[in-house]
Image: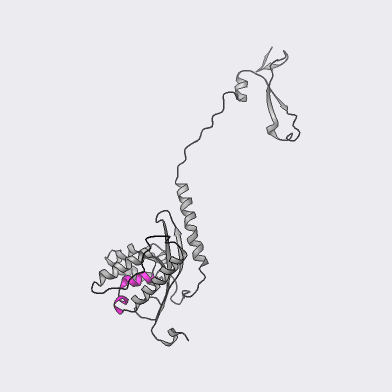
Amino acid sequence: MDKSAEDPVHIDVCVRNPFTHNTWEKGRFTSYEIAIQTTVKSFCLQCSITRRRFKEFEWLHKCLKHHHPLENPPALPPKKFFGERFDPSFIAFRMKGLEEYLKQLLQQDLYLSDEALHLFLQSNLSTAEIDKFLSGKIPSEAIEQLWKCKGDKSKCPCFGGSNHSCQREDEEIPYMNDDNDSLSESESKSNESDIEASMSETEYPCVTLVLPNSRISPMDKLRNKTPLQFSNTNNTENSDDLSSMNMVQIDSVDSSHSINGETR
């Protein structure tokens, strides 16, 4: 039987679905999906899913130490200074360590009362935006509207989102849905959009084609009053092709021919 069904108060946290991003601005990095399901009243959402990278976990760790200087939060999983940090085995090791880190944090009531932790776990605000809220640059009314939109700033009008796209109160978030194909497809298109944007902003030099002097255009021949004659080549394979029509200059001109109305 599920333990969450037995206990009236529970917190389930899961770190899963690592995804490696390749971007122009931030380079290459791996983010992890954080899924929360809880009945604890201190959480604004019973179910939530967000995505964070290791650098943001480091920000959270420093933020909690600054807010609670007398307490020592649990340690983050170690960094990898040598070798390939995008190796699947290392990513799996780090993902497990991050989940254990969050589980230890959520066991302490002191950290459960920290607003930075809740915004980190249940919203898609950046760490810079969370810092602005903590410093008073973002009003609390904006955060209240954010929670009404299930922590998604793209659906919150206070953060530039659409006012009609907030989720209903009874709409559930698929917490245990492991099918993340739609997420992977949207994330994988980031590189293509970045490349297309960079190509559209690139200025390419103009190219001028210069023909050799030996090729005289038909207009130059007319200006020199040299009669031109179109004749078909003997190539039967390209007899229907217009490219097989060659312009042949006539060296000897009969007296009955006229050029520009003049009769020789």
The residue shown at (39%, 82%) is: 10
Report the coloring of the rendering.
Answer: one colour
Q: Count the marks.
A: 0
Between 96 and 205, the one nearer to me in the picture: 96
Rendered image quadrant of residue 254: top right
- Asked whether residue 145 is in view, the answer is no
The residue shown at (37%, 76%) is: 103
Q: Which residues are magenta?
A: 109-124
Between 251 and 235, the one nearer to me in the picture: 235
Q: Position of residue 203 (x, y in %)?
A: 45, 42
Rendered image quadrant of residue 168: bottom left
Q: Position of residue 87 (x, y in %)?
A: 45, 63
Position of 10 with respect to 134 (left or right) is right
Between 236 and 75, the one nearer to me in the picture: 75
Q: Is residue 142 above or below residue 109?
A: above
Q: Position of residue 96 (x, y in %)?
A: 42, 72
Residue furthest left in the image:
70
In magenta stretch: residue 184:
no
Residue furthest front in the image:
82
Our reading of the magenta stretch's main secondary structure is helix
Q: Is residue 46 above or below residue 234?
A: below
- Asked whether residue 57 is in view, the answer is yes
In magenta stretch: residue 118:
yes
The residue shown at (47%, 47%) is: 200
Position of 242 with respect to 132 (left or right) is right
- Point out the image quarter for the C terminus: top right
Q: Position of residue 193 (x, y in %)?
A: 48, 54
